[in-house]
Amino acid sequence: MINIVLFGKPGAGKGTQAEFLKEKYQLVHISTGDVFRFNLKNDTELGKQARVYMDAGDLVPDELTTKMLIDEVNKHLDAKGILFDGYPRTISQAEALDAFLPTIGSQVTATVALEADDEVLVARLLERGKTSGRVDDQDEEKIRNRYQEYNEKTAPLMDYYKAQNKFHAVDGIGSIQEITERLTQVIDNL
Ligand code: B4P
């Protein structure tokens, strides 16, 4: 299996790029944000538990998120590879993934980070908030809280994957197509 972790700040374009990469490399795309939003929309027990965190721009607790992620991966054991979009977001999640994947004979192949300046990203999210209906995209304070969560809990993952020689960074500013090409160059050279 080729397992790619797409990494980046909120609004860096993980979901946008995943749409292209999953087709090109025939990967199963698992977006934890999308799975949570599906559960919110359908008012499931998981959705009820996650809503309070997501609406505030906080990360959902690790235990809940990791259980959901493992359930999703277990639905796709015959996949050629998985594109992890938005997971892991904490060291504890990364450790859980590193513990789980070997149980299905697999591992993280590489982490590819989309890098972009906070101010550009805040503007992107506010723009998306006009049409997405996402509560977490509509209020600048909540958006800024998401960056604080990122800096405190997610940024340390860069060193975690660098220590494993699995970290690759790509400039996330430019047209969507330019960024897809940059990502493709990295993945083709893995
Ligand atoms: P996510 O759904 O993962 O969302 P995101 O960080 O907002 O977005 P992404 O980087 O995918 O941006 P996108 O491509 O859409 O998370 C939402 C919430 O779910 C989290 O805050 C948390 O509460 C919860 N959650 C999810 N995973 C979790 C985990 N593992 N642990 C705990 N909690 C978790 O792009 C954003 C916008 O930019 C779009 O409008 C797009 O059109 C635009 N855009 C993209 N690329 C562009 C480009 N090159 N130029 C201009 N605009 C661009």
Image (cartoon, grey):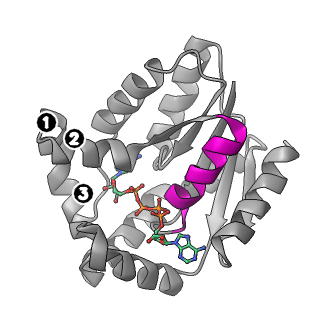
Q: Could you tell whether 82 is left or right of 177 in the image?
A: left
**Magenta region:** 12-26
> Is residue 21 part of the magenta span, yes or no?
yes
The rendered magenta stretch, by its main secondary structure, is classed as: helix
Amino acid type shown at disc 1: Thr
| Quarter occupied by residue 190 | top right
Q: In this orientation, which residue lies closer to the viewer: 66 or 73?
A: 73
Residue 141 in sight: yes
Residue 92 picture location, percent across and down: 45, 39
Residue 155 in sight: no
Judged from the image, the secondary structure of the residue bearing numbered disc 2 is: helix
Residue that label 2 marks: 39
Residue 182 picture location, percent across and down: 78, 63
Q: Residue furthest front?
A: 23
> Is residue 94 part of the magenta span, yes or no?
no
Query: Which quadrant of the render holds ligand 1?
Result: bottom left
Residue that label 1 marks: 44
Q: Nearer the viewer, mark 1 or mark 3?
A: 1
Residue at 71 percent of width and 61 percent of height: 180
Residue that label 3 marks: 54
Of marks 2 and 3, which one's residue comes earlier in the chain? 2
Residue at 65 percent of width and 58 percent of height: 113
Judged from the image, the secondary structure of the residue bearing numbered disc 1 is: loop
- Neighbourhood count class around disc 3 (C-alpha, 10 Å): few under 14, some 14–19, many 20 upward: many
From the viewer's perspective, is residue 50 above or below residue 135? above
Tell me, yes or no, whether the two marked residues, 1 and 2, touch with CB atoms within 8 Å. yes
Residue 105 picture location, percent across and down: 64, 13
Measured Cα–Cα span from mark 1 to mark 2: 5 Å
Q: In this orientation, which residue lies closer to the viewer: 72 or 166?
A: 72
Of marks 1 and 3, which one's residue comes earlier in the chain? 1
From the viewer's perspective, is residue 145 above or below residue 161? below
Amino acid type shown at disc 2: Asn
